[in-house]
Image (tube, grey):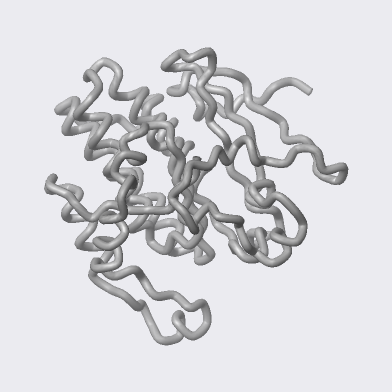
Amino acid sequence: MFYKMVNAARDSQPVDNLMGKKNAVLMKSKHRVQKHGEVFTPQWVIDKMIAIPGIKEKAQDVFATFLEPSAGEGAFLLAIEDMKLRFVTDNYSKETWDQYALWALSSIYGIEFLEDNLALARQDMLELFLNYYKTVHNAQMSEQSNLYKSARTIIWANVVQGNTLTHKNLLGECIAFSHWERVSDTLSKVQRTPFTYSSLFTDDRHESSGVQLSLFETMEQLDIFSMIETGKEDAPQPRRYVVVDIEQVWKEEKENV
């Protein structure tokens, strides 16, 4: 299920600081507005979005997926991440926090056209993850740890550069994400499968016009991974990654052909 929503309610100091930074400036420059239509979301819009019935409940589902198609510096992504990590922290044990927190990260997707915005969004998401870890474990996370490297790998795979209208990135390639699927109802095992943004569109008419059905138009549940089209003759099948513990995804080992 993909949902595009955010949370404005926060009560922890690290999160408050992040949100203050994300909403301080609505425009970076007139040039960027004219060239790219770049205007950041004001706080009152975030407040309106969090007030929509059902958003909090979906954000409290660790595995419910969210997509922000125009991420900017990541204010929406951070809000969603905060909701999910707050839920994990409040509802799961310290011993299982690492795994559930990675699953929460794996459910958050974003697309941003401008590379400087993308870099900030990714880094701030990682820093928010580190802040929560420190709160839970009362310790700094080592950058050499499997958890750090896997969190970074997931964020960098899920929050990507691209144009949501053309479905392409700056290299002219199709925007690509990864589906992180739990294996056999276990907590730690994951099967990572690449897929393209275009595969979320059900026909060529919608694909060419840039209309993504009702993914962002209603609050109804949509299992987006059942919508991915893999039967197109001209579409090569993606090469999946080997099944691993979710804390080992940073190794990015792929299945043998």
Q: Toward the viewer: 49 or 53? A: 53
State whether residue 149 is above or below residue 183. Answer: below
Q: Is residue 214 left or right of residue 136?
A: right
State whether residue 174 is above or below residue 101. Answer: below
Residue at 48%, 22% (x, y): give it: 248
Q: Is residue 135 left or right of residue 34?
A: left
Q: Position of residue 97 (x, y in %)?
A: 28, 23
Residue at 13%, 45% (x, y): give it: 12
Q: Position of residue 6 (x, y in %)?
A: 33, 53
State whether residue 203 is above or below residue 114. Answer: above
Q: Toward the viewer: 149 or 203? A: 203
Q: Toward the viewer: 163 or 145? A: 163
Q: Position of residue 60 (x, y in %)?
A: 31, 36
State whether residue 208 is above or below residue 213. Answer: below
Residue at 45%, 58% (x, y): give it: 118
Q: Is residue 156 visible?
A: no
Q: Is residue 34 left or right of residue 254?
A: left
Quarter of the image with the C terminus in it = top right
Q: Is residue 203 left or right of residue 76?
A: right
Residue at 33%, 58% (x, y): give it: 75
How many numbered discs, if any?
0
Residue lying at the far right in this picture: please name it: 233
